[in-house]
Amino acid sequence: MNILEVKNLNVSFYGEKIIDNLSFNLRNKENLVILGPNGAGKTVLLKCLLGVIPFEGEVRWIKDVKIGYVPQKFFPEKNTPLSVEEFFKFKKVSKKQIIEALQSVGIDNMSILDYTIGIISSGQLQRILIAWALIDNPKILLFDEPTAGIDIEGEKTIHNLLSRIEKEHDLTIIFITHDLSVVYKFADSVLCLNKKIVCYGSPQEALSTENIKQLYGEEVKFYKHAH
Amino acid sequence: MHTNLYSLITVIFVGGVAGYLGSLMITKKMALVGDALGHVALPGMGLALLWGFNVSLGAFVFLFFGVVSIWYLQTKTQLSTETLVGIIFVLSLAIGFLIIPKPELLHALIGNINQVSFWDFIISVILSISVFYIIRKIYSDMILSSMSEDLAIANKINIKKQNFIYLLTIALIVALGVKVVGSLLMGALVIIPAATSRNVSRNMRQYIFISILFGSLSGALGFLAFKITNLPVGPLVILVSVSMFIISLLFKNVKFLSKCHA
């Protein structure tokens, strides 16, 4: 059963094409990694899936789907007067639910609930955002990986944490990254994006040396050019 | 004596809700909006003074059109709210100066507490309480969308609608406030208590409570100072609230120290 169908998706900003005629499907419980260099349109694609920005074409989710979303960028100001507990309460959940959600992402020290959100380390904040996305039991998790690597202490990487959560929560995950190694860790299928589809399929099929070169080649050229 | 009591209660209510609205305004980085909207009220106040109807009503009519234009342009253009407010604001100022007769101009700019009648008082209290409850409903959604619009939209929050409601409530409170503290100073009554609160609060509950408290206190103490000195009430209210702000700066350092130990 397809949980998501994307057909002939096109996005342009000020006449410049960001996503060019993209089509793919996602089955229930299938983990999809969307891979591509910076500026390939990955985050834009995610925003189309969420309905945050306008697009041409079709994005069709299964009926009444519940989506959890972890954005790439989320930097509350240092002096934002908002505690972690209040941040969770935006979702009208009980304290018990908050504690469970935090525990499921590996946070056991509940004194964090009283901390101001702006002073939390980026690793802890990443965990909190995942807990926040999962707290009302979505079927899908859209995870847009931060560009800079984040050290999340305890669990080796954010990828390990997510693959554990995926098993526990029975989730379908769409994971956006520029990091090739993520694919081998937990992708059922991979979509390589550089404005249009460069490759799509199971990791074994899709990630030929040639495809990878095509995907990242432009970026390499760009760096050479800049120096 | 009654007039005094009406005026005092009016500034307490309007000041408190202005502080509440201000706490959102600072979070949304719209600090100049409140300031500018005070001036948008000017032509309406001018016409009211010329033709002898209620100053707040005249102010609200202009504020309403100002706010609707800002909101409309905001959704139709890529310009920031602050830019759009800037344009509407100077336009209003220009019209205001052209139509308000000189002696009334000063009243419009710095307010006149003696104008508060029984009905002004009743309406101010009712509207302040209504605005409080309306904003309470959308407050946390608005904080969330100020932190991340994407997260807010993904959570099915209608940002445009909430912004519109928010601007409308500002128009209402500014219209009530300009009568007392004047169009020049109303913005300060919205911004300063919230800025003070931000210096000393660590979570949203404290932030809201202290914003409202300091808004009301500024109004009340400013009014008492007016009774003692007989100087214009608007500037006194603002002096009180700025004093609180300066004192709060001392506590700001304490807050950060205690955070480091946490």
Image (tube, rainbow, N blue to C red):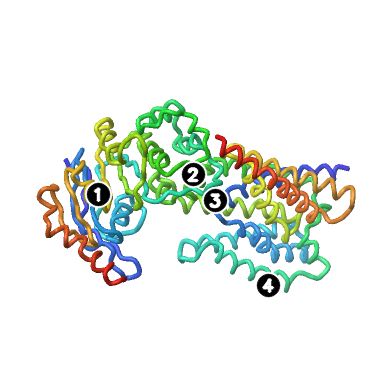
Q: Is residue A204 above or below residue A210?
A: above
Gap in Å between the C-alphas at discs 3 and 1? 31 Å
The numbered disc on residue B94 is 4
Q: Quadrant of the C terminus of chain B?
A: top right
Same-chain status of marks 3 and 1 = no
Which residue is label 1 attached to? A60
Q: Are marks 2 and 1 in contact (CB under 8 Å)?
A: no
Q: Where residue B3 sits: x, y (%)?
A: 84, 46
Q: Chain of mark 3?
A: B
Specify the farthest residue to the left.
A205
Disc nearest the viewer among 2 and 4: 2
Asked if marks 3 and 1 touch (Cβ < 8 Å), the reply is no
Q: Which residue is mark 2?
A: B141
Give the labeled residue for mark 3: B165
Badge 2 and badge 3 in a common chain: yes
Q: Chain of mark 1?
A: A
Q: Where residue B181 appears, x then y in whole percent?
A: 76, 55
Mark 2 and mark 1: span between their CA atoms?
26 Å
